[in-house]
Amino acid sequence: MRNSTKIKSLLQSTEFDSDVTIQGWVRTKRSSKSISFIAVNDGSTLDNIQAIVDNVNFDEQTLKNITTGTGVKISGKLTKSQGKGQSVEIHATEIKVFGTTDSKTYPLQKKWHTLEFLRDIAHLRPRTNTFGAILRLRHAMAFAINKYFNDKGFYYIHTPIITGSDAEGAGEMFRVTTLDMKNPPRTKKGDIDYSKDFFGQETNLTVSGQLEAELAALALSEVYTFGPTFRAENSNTSRHLAEFWMVEPEMAFYDIHDDMDLAEDFLKYLVKYALDNCLNDLQFLNKMFDKELIERLESVVKTDFKRISYTEAVDILVNSGHKFEYAVEWGIDLQSEHERYLVEQHFNCPVMLTDYPKDIKAFYMKQNDDGKTVRALDVLFPMIGEIIGGSQREEDLEKLQKRMDEMNIPHEEMWWFLETRKYGSVPHSGFGLGFERLMLFVSGMKNIRDVIPFPRTPNNAKF
Ligand code: 4AD
Ligand code: MG
């Protein structure tokens, strides 16, 4: 066990004159002839603790070795701070230098680094105030997600990463294979023979845990998955990753309205959790990146989300007189600019859209009686656009099979999914929250590459 105290708890301590030890990395050092001030951070909080060092008590080399980035252990007496901006400091009696840092080449200098520059040094960016805040916030959101569902009696289901099915039917999957790419086995027809591959069939990285979550929901009633998902879509935008985390609750006996109620309650809970537990980091992000962040978060917690149909939304957009880059007509997949217009210009609050045209949505969504639309749900957020995608599921075996035929999805591949509609099928619903989209919203960052430790995007899988 560690024999030192986390800086976060020391900064709240009032046990003055007690002997304390901290371990962390030097952020800055200021020295005069007789005295040095060393600011140390251990990542437990945004704030540094300051160690006051009487230079005479330490050998010159030790003091010289202490530069920005150096790993140190400092023991001393906790004292009430004289300087402003900090509550306590440490009068150092012992200093151990672990790893020194070549200050000439250390990329993190005490100056403002651009987010683009920090992406290139993603191995060091956790040491910056910005990424410390982001990583703590990410942790808090992941914890809050598990807490929310646990408190509600949902069970966490671990769905597979490697799969043979394409849940969303968009065909944007990464292949998983151990075949020799230079000389793959061939069938008589000349195609690659995947029956010789590792799993004896074609496999991919999953785009969603939904289909397997449905299997569990139809036994445990309320479940969720929370894991990495993969999409090989070549969209180099500030909102898309090739590898992202998705939270997917799936609930038996929920219709689309229950689904919407849960989505709204869940999102409000998460945003409120961030405000209640991460205010220090949020205030920093508010100051540095987005002056309206905290105000926006508070407003989302307070306001009712607007609920309208896709058809109503299209009418609003068409009648808006606004010039969109992509023209709007019934049947199109809404672009981020349309979604943001609805949220930021028209309603000025989060919007939940339902009943999308069936042709732009996945095969599993419950079909409406109009024969044109399905019980889809998208939740649209300010600054983000789509943050949640979900639906009520088609529980009728025949209707589901018919839709699969129309979309050329072979029944054999989905036999296990279809059996749930054959044996004790019940109404059920679910949705998927993109974890990094949530992180974008809660942190106020503008680029999704800046809310995940090691982003995977087209042409980039470094670190
Ligand atoms: O709307 P999507 O594709 O829905 C599904 O995958 C369903 N199976 C979910 C369900 O009903 N269980 O994706 C859900 C969410 C999106 O709303 C978005 O927030 C996020 O996942 N998302 C992405 N986030 C980052 N990068 C990408 N490439 C994303 N694609 C989707
Ligand atoms: Mg979607």
Image (cartoon, rainbow, N blue to C red):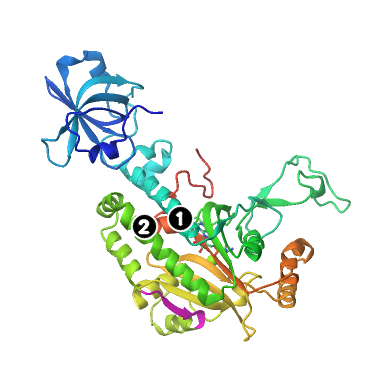
Q: Is residue 307 magenta?
A: yes
What is the CA distance from the residue labelled 1 to the residue labelled 2? 10 Å
> Can you tell which quarter of the image residue 129 is in?
top left
Which numbered mark, 1 or 2, is in the foreground of this view?
1
On the image, the x and y values in percent for residue 146 come to 48, 54
User: Of callouts 1 and 2, which one flags the residue occurring earlier in the amino acid sequence?
Assistant: 1
On the image, the x and y values in percent for residue 26 come to 28, 30
Query: Quadrant for ligand 1?
Result: bottom right
Instruction: Write the residue at 61% across / 57% down.
Output: 209
On the image, the x and y values in percent for residue 418 come to 74, 67
On the image, the x and y values in percent for residue 360 come to 60, 72
Residues under numbered marks 1 and 2 in contact, where contact means CB atoms less than 8 Å apart: yes
Which three-letter amino acid code belongs to the residue tagged 2?
Tyr
Q: Is residue 84 above or below residue 140?
A: above
Which three-letter amino acid code belongs to the residue tagged 1?
Lys
Kindly identify which residue carries mark 2.
273
388 to the left or right of 369: left
Kindly identify which residue carries mark 1.
147
In the rendered picture of this protein, how many numbered marks are placed on residues?
2
Q: Nearer the viewer, residue 68 or 216?
A: 216
Q: Is mark 2 within 8 Å of ligand 1?
A: no
- Image quarter (top left, top right, bottom left or bottom right) of the N terminus: top left
The local crowd at label 1, few if under 14, some if 14 to 19, many if 20 or more residues have their Cα within 10 Å, is few
The segment highlighted magenta reads 304-311
Instruction: Write the residue at 39% across / 36% down.
Output: 124
Query: Could you say which disc has been placed on residue 40 in the image?
Result: none
Instruction: Write the residue at 30% across / 64% down.
Output: 298
